[in-house]
Image (tube, coloured by chain):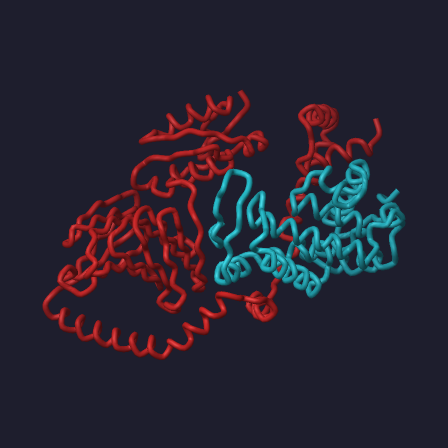
Chain colours: A cyan, B red
Amino acid sequence: MFVTNLNKDNNSEMSLMLDISGFEALFQVNYQSLCASSFRIVQDKDIAEDIVQDVFYRLWEKRDSLIITSSLKAYLFQSTINQSLNYIKKYKNALKREDLYGSETMEDVNDVEQAMALKEVNQRVEAAVKALPEACRMVFILSRYDQLSYKEIASKLDISVKTVEGQMSKALKHLRSWLLTGLSLINLFFF
Amino acid sequence: MSDEKYWNLMSRYVSNELSLEETEELLEWLGDDPVRAELLKELQDTWDKTKNYPENFKVDTRAAWQKLRSTIAVEKTDDQVRRIDSFRWIKIAAMVLLVLTIGVLSYKQLSTSGLIEVETLAGQHKELILPDGSKVWLNSNSSLTYEESFNSDEQRTVKLTGEGFFEIKRNPDKPFIVTTGRTLTQVLGTSFNIKQEDEGNIKVSVVTGKVSFKSKDNPVQELFLLPGDAGLITKEGYVAKSSYEDQNFLFWKNKSLTFQNSPVSQVIKTLEGAYEISFRLENSALLNQRITTSFDNASLNDVSDVLEALLDVKIVKSDSVYLVKKK
């Protein structure tokens, strides 16, 4: 990391020497991608920005006592993902058991119709990811973008590795059919 | 066998979660029917297409920073900022005077001396000795420009583009200043590397002595760099300081690389930059292994031999890529 003064004490631990200009540089470099990471989970840009600013705020508050075992960047991403998941757990009850196995809502069906009109692959991806049931999307996001293992995802979401596996297949089936045809065969594959 | 099981295997395959045995099982299943391989290809394709989600996601970083900045306490630095503010007018006045002086001096010099420019082409390196005895090594695609009268001026000033390593002859009366892009690097006597990176960032890494590094646009925010420090000024003018762990950034000059318990991911990245090649790993688990080794004037073949022995792999060149395979 070039943006801060990291004093390397040994290979696994670093103590942080962060002044305001280093802190600003750290913010400038990472803010956008951290917000994108949070957005994938919370699906709301304003909330994502609030979460990331809060992560930085906490980092600044604790900068003297903080011990970081990986890189500062990894720490920021970890914190952002954790805070975003906390938000989902707290305010949306998204990870309740019934949701994990529950049937789809009308909202999803509307999204299907909207997506049919979309020609662009990217827009399709956007709509397809959005239309995933929340728990299913969460598993996909954590694996796809945050490179977490099934085991790590299971422990973050408090579900079993088997459930993670099932959700992952579900997500991919959904995304594949959507991207292939522009249609989600929701009633077919959510058996 | 249930379909679901293979859906799970395929999902785990694309998300990089599959063990070796499971991979074999999956491959066997795929081999039984070409439709299945097609399906896996589609899934991989699906995975790849989602890479850039969310597309065109933009936030206003500057506004966010203002917002955050107003909420945090900046104890010591705050005082410093205020102190700097009160000296600001004096500083500005001093700078105006300095600019005028330099202007007059350079005008005077223009008539008597010319510019000397040393340039390197792609693949070319040059080592030069300046009139004051300082030494400069120029990396390829770089240039160094200075006045013929350089050593009789009040300051020793040179202009660098690209990358160069400087060994400055100490002279407390005549500071040595390198201008690179929108930055100034000022020293008395020391050695350091300056690199203009492709993205427009400028990086100074100090080997001996003390270096001052700042942006022309924001000279108040000055970095003082000591041996082991690296300073960076981005294209946008952001200033940052860090420490470097090894001197591999000097490979272009001394052809030596040292790795001390470094993860293979980092070793590969360094080698790719140093030898201008690219590697492809069959087994990405290798990336987390750590190795300790050093290379001095080593050919790519030597490097490849050492890696093969250390990692117990076979490295084969195919087209433009070096493939790292299981033995």
Q: Nearer the viewer, residue A178 or B269?
A: B269
Percent position of residue B179, x then y: 29, 61
Q: For the N terminus of chain B, which image quadrant? A: top right
Q: Residue at x 49, y 65 (%)?
A: B76
Percent position of residue B256, x then y: 34, 35
Q: Is residue B100 left or right of residue B235?
A: left
Extreme top residue here?
B327
Asked if one can make out residue A127 in the rendered structure from this viewpoint, the answer is: yes
Q: Residue at x 18, y 65 (%)?
A: B154
Number of labelled discs? 0
Q: Residue at x 67, y 64 (%)?
A: A50
Percent position of residue B2, x then y: 84, 29
Q: Is residue B197 left or right of residue B43?
A: left
Q: Nearer the viewer, residue B136 or B78?
A: B78
Q: Is residue B130 left or right of residue B177?
A: left
Q: Tell me where residue B249 sits by quadrant.
A: top left
Q: Nearer the viewer, residue B217 or B54?
A: B217
Q: Residue at x 34, y 42 (%)?
A: B250
Asked if one can make out residue A124 in the rendered structure from this viewpoint, the answer is: no
Percent position of residue B3, x then y: 82, 32
